[in-house]
Image: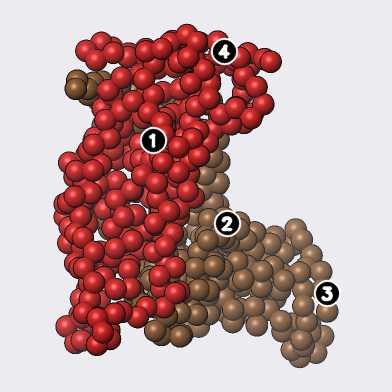
Amino acid sequence: MQVIPVTAVHRGFGTTTRRDAWWAAPLAVFVGLSAFVVYATWAAFQGEHYTYGPYLSPFYSPEIFGDSPHAWFGPKPAAWPGWLPFSPALLILPFPGLFRFTCYYYRGAYYKAFWADPPSCAVGEPRKSYWGEHSFPLILQNVHRFFMWVAIVFIAFLSYDVWLALWFTDPATGAREFGIGLGTLLLALNVVLLASYTWGCHVLRHVVGGRKDEVSKSPVCDMAYACVSGLNGRHQLFAWLSLFSVMSSDLYVRLCSMGVLTDPRIL
Amino acid sequence: MSQATFRIWRSRPGEAGGFADYRTEVSEGMVVLDAVHQIQADQAPDLACRWNCKAGKCGSCSAEINGRPRLMCMSRLNTLDLTQPVTVEPMRTFPLIKDLVTDVSWNFRVKKGIQCFQPRRPDAADGTWRMAQRDADRVQEFRKCIECFLCQDVCHVLRDHDKHDEFIGPRFFTYSAALEIHPLDSAERLGDLKDTQGIGYCNITKCCTKVCPEHIHITDNAIIPLKERVVDRFYDPVTRLLRMFR
């Protein structure tokens, strides 16, 4: 039996007989992720307008050092080198940023959208060489599990920020009173979406039960595995919703702080 | 009855292939395989096409229809734009034998290299085992595979990078997961998955999941869990440390 070698039919970059708009999804990912990276970088370097009343922007939480009342340890340390730009966000943003960068969903998405590897399913690629995540540098994506633990701790910090966002200071008396503003709802929604994304992580699914062949023998693991698997099925959805919610929350706090928006009180 | 044009890949051994157009009558309820059979009967009796059940269960009639890897028998014509020619090509990842027929024997050789199921010692004195239905359910999904090899066809590691010698492909990661996650299995496969079967080459584009006619969650339920087990075993210093104290 004579066969024709498969390499004889390989085609070049972007070549395909697909009729659908195969380029639309990678283009949307490219635009969406680029917009987020540009906005987040700009917002992180601003170093101002990140608080408004009891609200703290999620890009700046937890505020370890800073000038706002939310700062844990007061203003920027005196030992901070003068040539190094300082912003409270720069101390903490790398952790959630790297959690997303190494996330299984985002990896698949940006390999297509930014590196065309492949541009889309069954569409020709621009290069022949390929290492995948088999060797350096992409083998480092396996650090995702460590950033996941940090991201889980951040959910606790952001939840505490929502609690603080329920207590407004009366400008006349200086007394703290319970209240709910539109910002409180936005920050709360942001935590729900971030938690849904983080708790649906593939690594968490592995840790809580996926690593076991007989997960049913541990009822706690069994229940946790079922819950994480439920969220994991919508990981892509929550990845995008939480990305937009964290950006929107920062923008809302920023605009309120700049006086562009007025935060309406609901309660 | 209306007519539609089918642009079908034709090739003979030793010759470069190319598309040939066939215009044939189509009617309600037809699938691409029906049209190919009609063209075989009326216009091209030498057109080679592999098929068997015509019910999406044998995995024989895999092809690329309008550029997308699909089963011909499960591709209804009313889901395709018949105002333009419908392209029907062989799977591009495997060597071509003739027309729409490819040599998929590489897959069977790969399968032989995967560590077989090795049950643990029996749980009961009568030589039987006990396992929970919930645990069996996790691997049951993988047993739906009909070995159509569409996932292998669309995987760019095989399709565009020809890593057939270093990478076993999504079909066999699913097969390995069915054994590795099985509640009774005790064999060791993680070393092979990392070193010789190339699980690290997968960059999680999920194309395999998208083309699976059995809707198996290949990436989320098979490949990523195996990748995580490999990380546990070989890359994570914390889990390696913990294993020393067990």
Nearer to me, B202 or B59: B59
Label 2 environment density (alpha carbons within 10 Å; few <14, some 14–19, many ≥20): some
Dot 1: chain letter: B
**Amino acid type, callout 3:** Ile
Residue corresponding to mark 1: B60
Residue corresponding to mark 2: A237
**Amino acid type, callout 2:** Leu
Dot 3: chain letter: A
Residue A68 quadrant? bottom right
Dot 2: chain letter: A
Do the residues at pointers 3 and 4 share their chain? no
Determine whether the residue tagged by mark 1 lies in a helix, strand or loop: loop
Label 3 environment density (alpha carbons within 10 Å; few <14, some 14–19, many ≥20): few
Depth-wise, is mark 3 or mark 2 nearer the camera? 2
Asked if residue B41 lies left or right of residue B183, the reply is right
Residue corresponding to mark 4: B24
Residue corresponding to mark 3: A266
Give the mark, 3 or 2, whose residue is nearer the N terminus. Answer: 2
- Quarter in which the C terminus of chain A is drawn: bottom right
